[in-house]
Amino acid sequence: MEPKVKEQIALIENALSRLNWKDNPQSLYDPIEYVLSLGGKRIRPILMMEFCKMCGGKADYAINAACALESIHTFSLIHDDLPCMDNDDFRRGKPSNHKVYGEAIALLAGDGLLTAAFERVSVWSLAGLY
């Protein structure tokens, strides 16, 4: 992996770790933190940041939108793993969210990620950071 990509992934991981999930009830904070800590290639946020640079902006201008995009993707993975969908027991080599926290909490954690993504983008755009 190129050093530039490693640097971008580190920037994204850092930004994701700073998102304020702790405003959620602890029963939702833990499963959100769990699924985000499983890692991944973070291709979507990297592409968003690169597109921002191609359009003349700085990559860090897009970090909130990139985190929102990753949150939406992660939400879709949680919901996809649920018993009513694919019923996958593992995600990225670790037990699926519903296997660790139960189906109901996993569903709500996914919903929380989706809602937080829209909050992230709206706060970002309202602040004039576009």
Image (tube, rainbow, N blue to C red):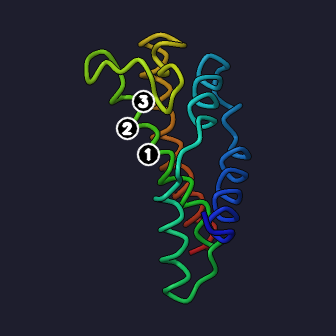
Instruction: Identify residue type, mark 2.
Output: Ser
Front-most of 98 and 65?
A: 98
**First in sequence: mark 3 or mark 1?**
1
Specify the quadrant that holds the N terminus.
bottom right
Image point (55%, 66%), residue name = 125
Q: Position of residue 101 (x, y in %)?
A: 53, 13
Tell me whether circle 3 and circle 1 mark residues in contact (CB < 8 Å): no
Q: Nearer the viewer, mark 3 or mark 1?
A: 3
Image point (62%, 16%), residue name = 27
Rendered image quadrant of residue 56: bottom right
- How many numbered dots are placed on residues in this image? 3
Where is 19 relative to 28, above or below? below
Specify the quadrant that holds the C terminus.
bottom right
Q: CA distance from mark 3 to mark 1?
A: 10 Å
Where is 10 relative to 80, above or below? below
Q: Position of residue 74 (x, y in %)?
A: 46, 40
Instruction: Identify residue type, mark 1.
Output: Ile
Q: CA distance from mark 2 to mark 3?
A: 6 Å
Image point (33%, 30%), residue name = 80
Residue assigned mark 2 = 76
Furthest-front residue in this view: 1
Query: Element type at marker 1?
Result: helix
Query: Element type at marker 2?
Result: helix
Rendered image quadrant of residue 76: top left
Q: Position of residue 117 (x, y in %)?
A: 50, 48
Residue assigned mark 3 = 78
Front-most of 50 and 116?
A: 50
Tell me whether circle 2 and circle 1 mark residues in contact (CB < 8 Å): yes
Q: Residues within 10 Å of mark 1 (few under 14, many from 20)?
A: many
Q: Residues within 10 Å of mark 3 (few under 14, many from 20)?
A: many
Q: Which mark is residue 72?
A: 1
